[in-house]
Structures are given as structure tokens and as C-alpha cells.
Image (spheres, grey):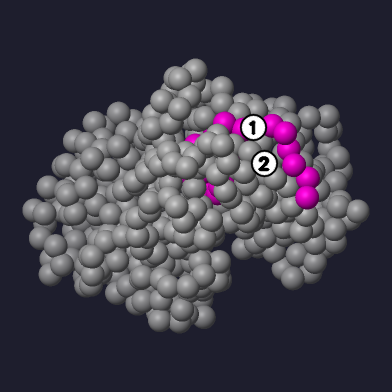
């Protein structure tokens, strides 16, 4: 076993959105940061969200006003800092009088607009559904409001890149297998999941941001640290051929009190979710059940003209949210707020409970505020005005026009996808290229070797799943033969 003589300021365990957010913020303040992730970045909860940057309209019913206000403020920050991967979206909410009275919804939307201060996005309004609506004819009235869509896994990767660009070390496929305190420091054993080799590192502070494994890691490796109960809640989504051609998303009320989103997804599909059920077991084995598919199918069929069945599902995914323990019987009503706990004996550990993707940056700022007494030399907050990698532009249409002028030979659909994925860093993909042949092997779906190389060299991608389902969403369009060709190419790169 090798040992690194460096003493890091922070060792962050977990490469989801919260771990990467804390690593980026800390590195930008001048701390020496190492982040380890046992799988790929965003390989668990952070890539299994409903892919929204939102305040959480339904959280108002649970009186979570502070959380909603913070999330709505962050919606504005993220729209500015990541305009390539975050897109404003209008949501329509058909009124179902037997579920919630109209005055209640109006009041909630008024509060939503008030808490957001309506800086960028238009406010809510009442709407009437005509014959051109994709909803069933029984839905005559409803409401419309604003939020935003995000490519969640790409958000995590970009935050990790931001951390690296401030000198943080990011080690994927690296599991924390042992940690013990020694002379006020943490001595931690990290195992490379590719080779099985181990390495010991030392750190002044541990940050447990391991998501659904937060309780397990605390119990197994940090038993001397006080900890909260963790409630794991499973959320499932399905993807079907698009239900309509409208640009709006829909928020559907269900008779059990829950809500389900139907969101335009990847041009040709609709994303539907989520379910919310308590989960027991290994989070890495979570998967959707047949009844959860039927649950989502049924709510769609209660509201939309286009009917679907389980056989129409082209893809599905499930994730586990690590929420703070609660006696609330209904899993959907458990708070999505976060809690940060700092223990200083026998050596400092910061444990992250809960959280939602929209508020990752605030969570990170609050985490660093807790650590400030341990690092008095640390610089101040900085991320609010810092664009994420590739987001250094103001207008996506203007950026696309620039790309079309500079590289007229690139297919328009490819430029659009790259602009929406890499922003201004699309220039790095096309630098030195003068024709399509320079992009290398075409694996299908507009994925060329040039992009694969970039994802492996710059974004920690290694496997087929990393590339097709997290860095891109091209898995929805790939055949078995195309997957095999890409797998062969990835193996050849490593040899």
C-alpha cells in the first residue's frame, strides 16, 4: 500500500452534486481538496432526478418557505451561470377541482412568484385549454408558471471541472474503505476500483457527502461520530415517445395527493416522474418496479389524449434520495431541506444530510461557513458570480450562430447538441477541424470519436454508460451494434 505525504485540507467522499459543490467552493477559497467517488460522477442520485431547477411549488403546502425562497433565488443564479445546460421552461397545471380548490392553487402560485421576486422568468397566470391542448377535453382550466430544466449529470460534471480548475483533485472509481483519526488528522485508505490497489492519504477534515450511503459510511467507518437517522426515499421515472408537440411541461395532480411531472425530453421523448416510496436495501441496486411503471402510466392516461402503456416505455431510471429521518408517514411529504453536522472530535467531520440539486451551491457555501473556524486563512464566498465551465456567454442562439458561421460544415443538429452540452467549450471540440472527417469515427446518433475522446480526457468518462447516459443522453438512440462499436473503441483507448 502506498502513502501520500501530502496533508489535504478537505477529503470529500462522494461525487454527487453536493460533494462536487463543496469541493469546488473549497478549492476556490484556496483549500487543498481531494474528492473521491466510488463510481462515476453523478452515478447515483444526482443523475436520477426529475432534472429541474425549481423552487418546489408543492413544498409550499408543507410550509417550507425558507427552502422554496432559497431554491428560487438559486434558480436565478444557475440560469446565469450555466445557460448551456439549464433552460427556462413553462409548466401547465390542469385544474382538478376534487383534488385542490382553485383558490389554493392561485394562492400557492402567488406565493411562488412573490418568493422568487420574478427577476428573470415570467410569472404565473390562469390558462384555458382549447381543442389544441394535449390534455383530455374534460380539462378546461388550469394555471401556468415558470421554472427551469437542467441536464443534472452534466451539472455535476461541470461543477467537478470547476473544482479541478481551482486545483482540486478528483478521483473517480475510488472507494473510501477505511478512516481513522490520528493526532487530530484523518488517515484514510482509498481503493482504486479498477485495479484493487490501495493508497493512504491524510486530511485535516473529512466531508461525508456520500448521498444515500451517508448513514452506512458513518456507521461503518466513523462510529465515533454522532449521526442522524437517514430516511431513504426511492424516486422513479419513465421515458416514452413524446406525448405532444407543445414546448410546455405539465404538472399533474394525482388523487393520492402527489404530483407527477411530464416534461419534454431530448426532442423526441417525454420524461414522466416521479414516484416516492421508502426504500430499504443497497442503493446501488435500486430499480423501478412494475407497479411504479403502472402508477406513472395511469396518471398520464387520466390526463392526456395520447394514451400510453408499459410497453411504450423506452427507458426508465430510479434513484434514492437520502433525507433526514422523519416520522412522517407519507414519503412525499418528508422535507427536501438539507442539514449539515460538524463534529470536531476525534478529528473534524462534516456530514451532509438531504439537499436538492437546485440548492447545491447554497449548501456548499453553508458547509464552508461551518468550516471557517478551522481554516481562518480561507478566502470568502465566490461561486455566486462564477459561470460553470462552458457557460461564459449570454445568449445560446447567438452562440449557435457564431458556431454555424465558424464551422458551417458541422451538421446543425450536432452543433445544437454541443452548444447545449459544452457551451463555449464546443470550440475545444472543433479546434483544428476543417471537415466532418476530422471528427473521427461516427458511432451513430451524432456521436463522433472526437467527442468521445474529449469526454474521456476532460470529463472522467470511462465506460459506455458514462458516455451514453450521463455525459450525453444518446443511449436513447443507440442500437446494440452501435453500443458494441463504442465499447470496442473505449477498450482500444485503454490499451
* Structural crowding at the residue carrying mark 1, measured as other residues with C-alpha within 10 Å and reported as few (<14), some (14–19) or many (≥20): some
Q: Which residue is drawn at 56% across and 22% down?
A: 30
Q: Which residue is drawn at 62% across and 33% down?
A: 8
* Image mark for residue 201: 2
Task: List x then y, in percent, for residue 275.
Answer: 37, 68
* Magenta extent: 1-24
Q: Residue at x 78, y 30 (%)?
A: 431
Q: Which residue is drawn at 47% across and 60% down?
A: 219
Quarter residue 364 falls in? top left
User: Along the horizontal axis of the image, is 389 left or right of 375?
Assistant: right
Q: Examine the rendered structure and indicate whether residue 340 appears above or below residue 304.
A: above
* Structural crowding at the residue carrying mark 2, measured as other residues with C-alpha within 10 Å and reported as few (<14), some (14–19) or many (≥20): many
Of callouts 2 and 1, the N-terminal one: 1
* Number of numbered tags placed on the structure image: 2
User: Along the horizontal axis of the image, is 387 left or right of 254?
Assistant: right
Q: Distance between the residues labelled 2 and 1?
A: 7 Å
Asked whether the viewer can see residue 402, the reply is: yes
Q: Does the magenta stretch include residue 115?
A: no
Can you identify the residue that label 1 sits on? 7
Task: List x then y, in percent, for residue 454.
Answer: 75, 41
| Front one among 8 and 416 | 8
Asked whether the viewer can see residue 128, the reply is: no
Amino acid at each position: 500500500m502506498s502513502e501520500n505525504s501530502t496533508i489535504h485540507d478537505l477529503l470529500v467522499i462522494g461525487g454527487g452534486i453536493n460533494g462536487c459543490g463543496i469541493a469546488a467552493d473549497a478549492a476556490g477559497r484556496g483549500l487543498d481538496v481531494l474528492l473521491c467517488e466510488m463510481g462515476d460522477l453523478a452515478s447515483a442520485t444526482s443523475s436520477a432526478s426529475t432534472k429541474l431547477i425549481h423552487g418546489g411549488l408543492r413544498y409550499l403546502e408543507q410550509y417550507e418557505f425558507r427552502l422554496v425562497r432559497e431554491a428560487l433565488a438559486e434558480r436565478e443564479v444557475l440560469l446565469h451561470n450555466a445557460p448551456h445546460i439549464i433552460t427556462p421552461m413553462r409548466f401547465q397545471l390542469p385544474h382538478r377541482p376534487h383534488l385542490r380548490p382553485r383558490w389554493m392553487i392561485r394562492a400557492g402560485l402567488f406565493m411562488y412568484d412573490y418568493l422568487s421576486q420574478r427577476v428573470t422568468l415570467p410569472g404565473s397566470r390562469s390558462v384555458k385549454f382549447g381543442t389544441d391542448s394535449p390534455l383530455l377535453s374534460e380539462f378546461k382550466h388550469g394555471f401556468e408558471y415558470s421554472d427551469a430544466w437542467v441536464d443534472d449529470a452534466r451539472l455535476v460534471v461541470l461543477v467537478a471541472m470547476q473544482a479541478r480548475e481551482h486545483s482540486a483533485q478528483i478521483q473517480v472509481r475510488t472507494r473510501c474503505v477505511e478512516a481513522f483519526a490520528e493526532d487530530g488528522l484523518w488517515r484514510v485508505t482509498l481503493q482504486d476500483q479498477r485495479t484493487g490497489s490501495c493508497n493512504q492519504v491524510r486530511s485535516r477534515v473529512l466531508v461525508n457527502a456520500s448521498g444515500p450511503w451517508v448513514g452506512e459510511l458513518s456507521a461503518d467507518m466513523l462510529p465515533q461520530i454522532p449521526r442522524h437517522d437517514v430516511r431513504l426515499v426511492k424516486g422513479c421515472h419513465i421515458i416514452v415517445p413524446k406525448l405532444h408537440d407543445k414546448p410546455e411541461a405539465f404538472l399533474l395532480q394525482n388523487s393520492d395527493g402527489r404530483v407527477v411531472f411530464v416534461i419534454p425530453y431530448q426532442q423526441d421523448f417525454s420524461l414522466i416522474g416521479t414516484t416516492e416510496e421508502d426504500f430499504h436495501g443497497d442503493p446501488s441496486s435500486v430499480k423501478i418496479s412494475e407497479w411504479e411503471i403502472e402508477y406513472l402510466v395511469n396518471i398520464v392516461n387520466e390526463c392526456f389524449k395520447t394514451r400510453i402503456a408499459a410497453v411504450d416505455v423506452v427507458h426508465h431510471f430510479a434513484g434514492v434520495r437520502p433525507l433526514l429521518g422523519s416520522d412522517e408517514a407519507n414519503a412525499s411529504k418528508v422535507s427536501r431541506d438539507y442539514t449539515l453536522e460538524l463534529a470536531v472530535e476525534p478529528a473534524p467531520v462534516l456530514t451532509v444530510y438531504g439537499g436538492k440539486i437546485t440548492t447545491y451551491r447554497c449548501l456548499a457555501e453553508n458547509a464552508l461557513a461551518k468550516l471557517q473556524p478551522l481554516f481562518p486563512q480561507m478566502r470568502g464566498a465566490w461561486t455566486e458570480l462564477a459561470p460553470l465551465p462552458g457557460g461564459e456567454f449570454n445568449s445560446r442562439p447567438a452562440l449557435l450562430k457564431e458556431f454555424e458561421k465558424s464551422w458551417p460544415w458541422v451538421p446543425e443538429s450536432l452543433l445544437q447538441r454541443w452548444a447545449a452540452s459544452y457551451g463555449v467549450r464546443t470550440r475545444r471540440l472543433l479546434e483544428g477541424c476543417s471537415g466532418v472527417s476530422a471528427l473521427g469515427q461516427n458511432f451513430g446518433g451524432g456521436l463522433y470519436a472526437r467527442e468521445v475522446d474529449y469526454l474521456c480526457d476532460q470529463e472522467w468518462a470511462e465506460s459506455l454508460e458514462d458516455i451514453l447516459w450521463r455525459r450525453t443522453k444518446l443511449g436513447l438512440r443507440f442500437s446494440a451494434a452501435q453500443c458494441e462499436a463504442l465499447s470496442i473503441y473505449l477498450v482500444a483507448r485503454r490499451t
